[in-house]
Amino acid sequence: MPFFQKIGQAFRAYWKQYTVLKVISFLLIGYIALWSYAPVGTFGSTGGFVSHPPGYIIDPASEERTDAGIILTKGSERPIVAENNLQMFCLGVTRASAFFMYPSLVLVFTTKFRATMEIIMQSPLSMFTYDDLHELHIYCGWVIVFDGVLHAIFHCIRWGNQGNMNLLLDTRSGISGIVITICILLIGVPMMFEVFRKRIAYEIRKYLHYFFIVFCVAMSFHAPLSTIPNGGFACIIFPTLICWYMLDALYVYLFMTEKIDTTIFHVVATGVQLTMTVSERFQRRGGSGGYCYVNFPWISKNQWHAFSLFENPANPNERQIYIQDLGNWTHDVLKALQRDTHRPIWVQGPFSSPYDNAVESDNQILVAGGIGITPAISVMRKHKDMRRTNLIWAVRDPHMLEFFIKHGEFSSRGWNLVFYTGKQPLYVGDAHEIMTSTGAIVHIIRARPNFDTLIPNIIYSIESGEFVPEAFISEIKIDAISQLKEELMELDKTPLTSREKMTELINFSDNLGFLFTDLMQEIAKGDAGVEEHLDYAKRTDVEKGTVVEKKEIVGEDKMLAKIRQTSVDQLFPFDEADGSGRRTTLGRRTTLAAYKMKSNNKRISRMSGDSQHNLLRHRGRSTMVGKAWSAFDTNMSDWIKDEVEMFRPWIDDSAEAKEFVKALDRDHVLSTWGALYCGGQGPLADSLKKTTKEFGVSLALESFKW
């Protein structure tokens, strides 16, 4: 690749992120260059330092001050003498670096003004803010460290070239500059490099951030106020930021902090779920999702830690967080909770997070790394009815995976793909599909996610209409319907009445993990007579296997007859083959064979002891029905292998999908898609950024890179 082409690519990549911020920074460079290098008197007494002749920056009224490296301007002495080209260049670098980082100096503070930013995020001004304020905070920190060190180095080079290094200790700019540089390094360096983040405890790195107060005080005295507009703005900016910070923090402590008197902890091997009843203010302000800061005073009164919030589906007044054992504080929490306790805690918030942007997309791809699953759980619950949410979760902790599979509320209208990279065996064994308590299917893939395949395949499956996730789910019901039919055939051999058979079938369906009415809905499609009675059955109360009538049900025989008539053609509908000889629509989507082999043990394990015995007794009985079922099962499995093309977005060749997605209208179709990521900043996030950029899908990132 030609050299200039590489330069062009690097330049475009640089400008893509925080473009407005960078434009403002470069405009400020132009501003201070104009005021600094204009001839004396160009802007009256307020600007222009270059004397003519000799064309350098000196004090024309005093050769002695010039030799000392100082000029007198507007009654203030400033150490900005430049007597040759090298010194002029060094002065230019110092002034440019100072003014370039002014916007970053302001934003590095305001992005952490939690009350202020929450007010903005709840107003129309949120349309003009950046999605991930923490990521912006990190960017501004890098700019400050780089420009601050550059500023100090080139001042020292200029003063050294003059022989005036004493200015470091003899002037307010020199002394304050030393303090500022030390503060920048103490705050920034431990956060910038992975080697320091791993070796320096979170608590120490957090406390080092409080040197920002010393930094602000030193900046307030770095240049005299009288030099405005040729510098001196720091005298106004930093006292303002300090006062603003104090008022913001006071508001959070007084009006956004509450005590949780009674806490409920659910402890697992590597973490703990905290359930807490929050105030009406908390519920009203937070709605659902977001994050909060928690303090456990019986662990440490000084430490507040941020965690994503998700709702308790059983109680709208409760919020939950999941604390994973990752550091000293979390380890102490887990250790303290080995004894049962309900001691109080303090919580601050709630605060908005980038995951709140999920509302902007009709089709969501939620990507999580490890504990990043918590905001995704909240989004799936909130948008389960009105939007299509797809989950991609990479996790290596088996305890966390098992906990959220059991307690999380997954979407029934999207792909739920869990990529397990841990070495420990899971409680589900080698199962590839798990049905949650809400009826959603979670696919367990023992590999790392490949976004280059996943993203286009997920979009293709839904936008094409050929492989929608709910079709996969409805086909799994076929297995239960087949077993329901077998159970009815066994019941037909008994003297039970239709009413009693219905009761037995309702209990049997429940043991399989399905509502009887849901299974009947699949069977009764297109039969108005059965559907009419099914509507009534949905309004019937079931208490411990006994049907409680609200009025006379006359359609039981009709429903039972419909179950008996259920055929293979009903359970596996498909269209004619297309021109390529492939089965289309539902025929291509059938996944019964794979599911049957992996789900039976799971279903049996969920049943009570008696139910397990009855089900195994029915399946093991050597009757004509059992033999017929075995023949049906064998033939059906062979038919599926020969005739059906299974669609799995994590495996299927994505070449066709990529072409399809790239041909979609980016303004009207792909604009309805959005990816959201919560997790560590590493290869997973980098790969997702690359893939979403390639296919024109918006991406919002949430990361607390501490």
Image (tube, rainbow, N blue to C red):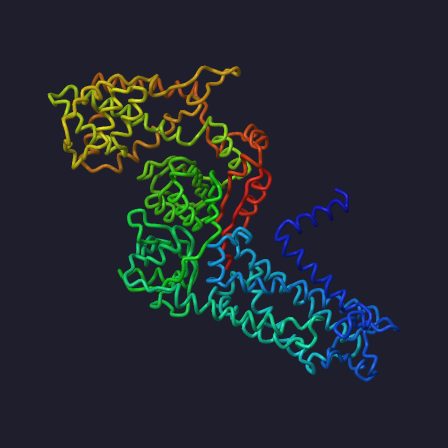
- Furthest toward the right, the residue is 53
Q: Is residue 12 above or below residue 461?
A: below
- Furthest toward the left, the residue is 495
Q: Is residue 562 left or right of residue 185?
A: left
- Furthest toward the front, the residue is 44
The reply to whether residue 622 is in sight is: no
Image quarter for residue 467? top left
Q: Is residue 89 left or right of residue 617?
A: right
Residue occupying the point 72% across, 68% down? 94
Q: Is residue 664 left or right of residue 303?
A: right
Q: Is residue 597 left or right of residue 698?
A: left
Image position, residue 527 (x, y; %): 29, 19
Q: Is residue 52 above or below residue 483?
A: below
Residue occupying the point 43% across, 67% down? 251
Can you say which quadrant of the picture contains the N terminus? top right
Q: Nearer the viewer, residue 151 or 426?
A: 151
Image position, residue 51 (x, y; %): 84, 73
The reply to whether residue 315 is in sight is: yes
Image quarter for residue 487? top left
Q: Nearer the viewer, residue 56 or 5?
A: 56
Q: Nearer the viewer, residue 424 or 263?
A: 263
Q: Count all numbered tags in the image, as a single digit.
A: 0
Image quarter for residue 89? bottom right
